[in-house]
Amino acid sequence: MKIKSLFISLGILIVLFVSCENDDVIMNTELDEDLSSVVADEVISDINFADLLDEGDDGVFYGDDDFVSVNLKSASIEQVVCFTKQVAKEDDKWIITFEYTGECAREGTVIIEHYLPDDSGVKKKTVTYIDFKKRGVTYNGTRHIERGNGMYNITANMEIDRLNDNGDSVHIVRNYEREVEWLCGLDTRDVVEDNIKKVTGKCEVTRTVNGEEKSYSREILEPLLIVRACELRIQAGVVEINRVSGKVVTIDYGPMPDEINCDEEFNCDNSFVVTIGDETVNMEYVDGERVEVSESE
């Protein structure tokens, strides 16, 4: 049967980074509509996070050898249609402001503040989103990023607003901590498509639909493998969602590969498994427009 809440949420949210078209979600099992919508939000939040990592998180920090060439070059050199770029210098930081023009499916402001490294060698930057829109979804909030020993830590408060096709007004607040390890692509920062990262962390979520607020927490039980070249950005890992009241939900994106060869094309898999209490459901992205769901055997 069709579960309206899930196919509306998935249909609307997938357009952020995959498609401009809505499509059906086919389900052969009975799910609570509110819970279905939560699952949809959480699946898409992983995709959104993967793409937001590439909106300002290019891996470069103040003090890196290539900081000037990557961050301080004129915006007129490239992508001037998508944004305008301003650079300012203060005593302890560089401030780089991107004003997106509405082209390239982006609108609004992204401000990146690169801080002078401290005595310990830890490098820091802050990425702030001000009414930043992608395909009708608006982001506001700030992420603080610290890098050391080949990994970086992110703490963030993000607010997400959207209007569903059925008229539902959705407001989501996410407070999260995540640790990100670059596996591939750090040495080719100008090529987003070859980025592969591993992510761990936890998150507190408040979700308000038409004024009705509900809260829950989520934790990455097994590291998420983010592969930017894949349609479904998350290619491995397990996420657990704990609602204040209700069943525990687990989203399983599959096992981590034994090894990753950065010089070879990644073998993408668009399937994942959702477990709600004792019930298990298989899901799969198809051509970036459909999530097909069937009851597990």
Image (cartoon, rainbow, N blue to C red):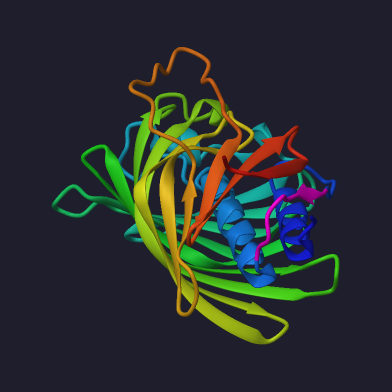
Q: Nearer the viewer, residue 100 or 27?
A: 27
Q: Is residue 155 visible?
A: no
Residue 213 higher or lower than 229, as above or below: below
Give the overall secondary structure of the magenta segment.
loop
Task: Please say if 40 is above or below 147.
Answer: below
Task: Please check the rendered image and state whether residue 227 is part of the magenta-colored stretch, yes or no.
Answer: no
Quadrant, the C terminus: top right
Q: Is residue 104 left or right of residue 177?
A: right
Which x, y percent locates residue 53?
50, 46
Residue 83 lies, in percent from the top left, at 70, 47
Q: Nearer the viewer, residue 234 or 65?
A: 234
Q: Is residue 263 above or below residue 31?
A: above
Q: Residue at x 38, y 26 (%)?
A: 257
Q: Residue at x 64, y 57 (%)?
A: 40
As drawn, which residue projects farthest toward the bottom? Answer: 211
State the extent of the magenta-drawn residues as a range: 24-31
- The extreme left residue here reads 120
Picture coordinates of residue 205, whole percent (x, y): 49, 71
Quarter of the image where the N terminus is located: bottom right
Residue 275, x across and y down, in percent? 50, 54
